[in-house]
Every structure is written in C-alpha cells, then in structure tokens.
Amino acid sequence: MSLILCIETGTDICSVGIAKEGELLSLRESDEGRDHARKVAVFVDELLRETGIAPDELDAVAVGKGPGSYTGLRIGVSFAKGLCYGLRKPLVAVGSLDALTEVAREDYEAGIVAVDDWERAWLCPMVDARRMEVYAQIFDTAGVARSEVSAEIVDAESFAAFRRGDRPFVIFGSGARKCAGVLPDAQLIEVTPSARGLARLAQEAFDEGRTEDIAYFEPFYLKDFVVTTTRKSLF
C-alpha cells in the first residue's frame, strides 16, 4: 500500500491531495489567488489530520513540476523537497500538463464535461503564459503525449497538424479561454489544475522507481525567468 502526498501549485490554484495506491483519499484546494506559500503547509496539515495519516507513514511526495508560474512552481517544489528531506521520503515529479490532461480524462469519465467523439479527440491542455502565449502539449484520450511541451504564441495556424480532419480538438486549462476565439474550430471545456491529476501518474512513477534527486531537482520552467524593471513610480 502506497500513500503519496500530491502538490500542485503551478497556477493560481493551490491544490494538495493524499492518494492511496493511485486513488485520491482527500483534497484541499483554493483559487483565491497567489497565496500558495501560506496555504500549502496549512492544507497538508489539514489533510494529514483529516485522514489520520502520520507524516512518516507517507511513502513519497509528488509535485507538479511545470511548466507554469515561476513563483508557484518554486513554492510547491521547495515545500515538497523540504518535506522529503525532513521525512527521508522520495520525491516524484509529474508534468503539470500530463496532470491537467489526467483531470480532463477523469472529468469526462465522471460526466462532468462532455465531448462528442471523445475516443478520437486530441486533448490540448494550456497553461497561461501571459498575453497570447501558453504552455501546451497534445495528448490522445488515453493520456499518451503526441507532441512535445511547447511555449506557443497562439494564432490561427497554431496546432495546425492536429486541427486538420474531423477529429475534435479540445482545449482546456488556465490559458484556454483566451485562445478560443483564435481557434474557432477548437472545443473549449472547463478543466482546472488539481492535485488529483497527480495521483495515478505519481503512483505509476513511484512503482517504476522514477524518483528525483532532492538536492538537484528543479522545476521545469520551459522558459527562463526574466526580471523586468517596473514602470511604476516608487516615490
């Protein structure tokens, strides 16, 4: 029996869950803005108390590794690494777009979202990267990646190879709504990042021994963080 703590903080949503053998036991989430540094520890404490699980009973800690918000990823990964170091537990990293696709698949199976001809659809999770840019990847409905992760400035020609023919092209995530008007043939569904998307994927990685070096692991930012000078007057 494996117990894995799952942490996803790569967007405005702070989400923490505990999974047993890949099945979610309990979940805490907030979409109240970028307050992850305070909330993630509180959520972990609440979940452990609620489930009666002692910290040393955890078998691993899983974290969404990105791409996503630079600050959000730093908070989640730093907290997960500190927990792993203190508890002497392994760290499992899950791609945030993989996890978002897993949430979409679960929501479809639960009847929360509807997509005609689902079995043939292309799934395109999108994480907002400001302006008309998104972090995106293409998956089939079995959750198998069909493209590499990319930082895409979305225009009418974006993802053209997957928008040809009669297969549904389904977009979702924090960057999807702003792209719907530019990609009129895409189907927009409401799916948000969640730690529940990590549960099965983290268990799979843990079973296969795919864990990270806690000392050297860094989030997958995809793009370098750029510091800019504010134009606001400070005085």
Image (cartoon, rainbow, N blue to C red):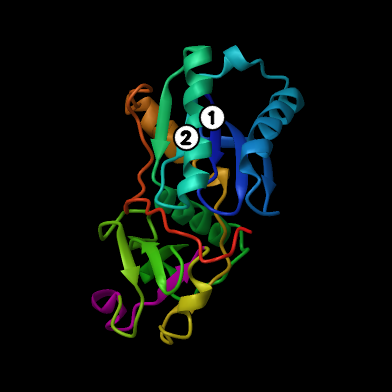
Residue at 53% in and 38% down = 75
Residue at 45% in and 72% down = 131
Q: Which secondary structure lies at badge 2? A: helix
Residue 205: numbered disc: none
Task: Point out the stretch of residues depicted in magenta.
Answer: 159-173
Numbered label tally: 2
Give the quarter of the image for residue 24. Answer: top right
Residue 36 in percent (x, y) is at 62, 42
Residue 4 can be seen in this image: yes
Residue 79: numbered disc: 1
Q: Amino acid at mark 2?
A: Val
Viewer-side residue, 101 vs 174: 174
Residue at 47% in and 43% down = 73
Residue at 47% in and 85% down = 181
Q: Are marks 2 and 1 in contact (CB under 8 Å)?
A: yes
How many residues crowd mark 1 within 10 Å: few (<14), some (14–19), many (20+)? some
